[in-house]
Image (spheres, rainbow, N blue to C red):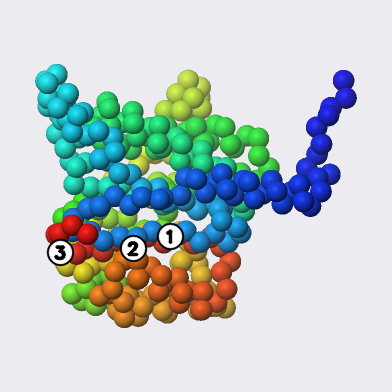
Amino acid sequence: MKSTTKPIREWSKDDLAEELLYLQEVGSLVLPRNYPKLPGIDYYASIESYRGSVGGDHVMLVNFRKYNLKQKIAEARKSGNLTLAERLEKNLDSFGILIADVSGHMIGNNIVVNYLHGALKTGIVYELRHKGEITQELFEIINSDLYIHLQPDLKVKPYTTLLYGEVHGDGRFRFLSAGHPPPIIFSNEFNKIQRLDSDHLKASTPLGVLPGKFSIDTEYFEPLGITNGGFDVNEIHLLGHGDIMLLYTDGLTEHKDGTSRFKDTRLEDILIETKSESAKEICETIKKELYSFCPPEDDLTLAVIKKVHSKRQ
């Protein structure tokens, strides 16, 4: 029987343009729209895609209060599960933030972004209901699934770097990293970017590169020599009023004009100049200065998180 499928190479330019515009429209549905409020924290996140409105970068905000935490806490206490209730209560003074970067910056990379977003949204519901918190195991499961389903069939094997963390009102930031650039911390007191020691920068391999320790590849068959060893949780503190933390993709760190990198030559000065401004103003200034430095060659995602006085924003 003759196939009636029309190969993409035979599509007209108008058909291709219409399809790409629709892909961008659907892909943008998962971008953040509402920002959870947290006393003591001012923050803002932005994505600038290299091609169109979506690409391989992603930001996801987790508003724990939307998961009926108080009801879940009451039910856990009523059933005698005090451990679950205590874990759920810790989420009341925090929000989650995820920064991810699928290798490449084509619009098609957004398909992996949307898979990741959906898997996380579903996983979070399960994690909170049964464990009271988001655990490393969720990311181990997603890593294994990405490795199994994406690696064998694609000519260009995608991988995803990822940083997921939870911001608390007192300035604590607990996070895990899958091969992602580490947070940048600017100290208001010392007026400079602070270097984080290796104890606060433990990271795993990017998602989809190696099978997990307990995936089908290693649990039931002869284990491979190298696997993803799981995810360590790091914790840092934004102790001082006015301290700033940047979460970002490599569009920030690899942005350079010849041999001169924006991060090394301009970023600290910009933070010194804007440290008294709001998180949104700091973010917008960094982007403006970055694009003035030289034209972009990659997607850019940037989140600015600032410790402020403990009052409602």
Of pointers 1 and 3, the one earlier in the residue sequence: 1
Q: Report the disc number at residue 304.
A: 2
Instruction: Answer with left or right where residue 120 lies relative to residue 41.
Output: right
Label 2's element? strand
Question: Residue 12: x and y, percent?
Answer: 81, 48
For badge 3, the amino acid type reads His
Q: In the rendered image of this protein, does residue 108 appear above or below residue 251? A: above
Residue at image coords 35%, 66%: 280
Q: Which mark is residue 46?
A: 1
Q: Earlier in the sequence, mark 2 or mark 1?
A: 1
Task: For label 3, count other residues whose C-alpha is less than 10 Å away and answer few (under 14), some (14-19) or many (20+).
Answer: some
Q: Residue at x 42, y 79 (%)?
A: 265
Residue at left offset 33%, top offset 28%: 126
Mark 3 and mark 2 residues within 8 Å of each other at the beta carbon: no
Name the amino acid, label 1.
Ser
**In this view, 114 is above or below 68:** below
Q: Is residue 203 left or right of residue 42?
A: right
Mark 1: few/some/many CA within 10 Å (<14, 14-19, 20+): some
Name the residue nearer the viewer: 69 or 103: 69
Residue 252 x/y as whole percent: 46, 66
Disc 2 marks a residue whose amino acid type is Val
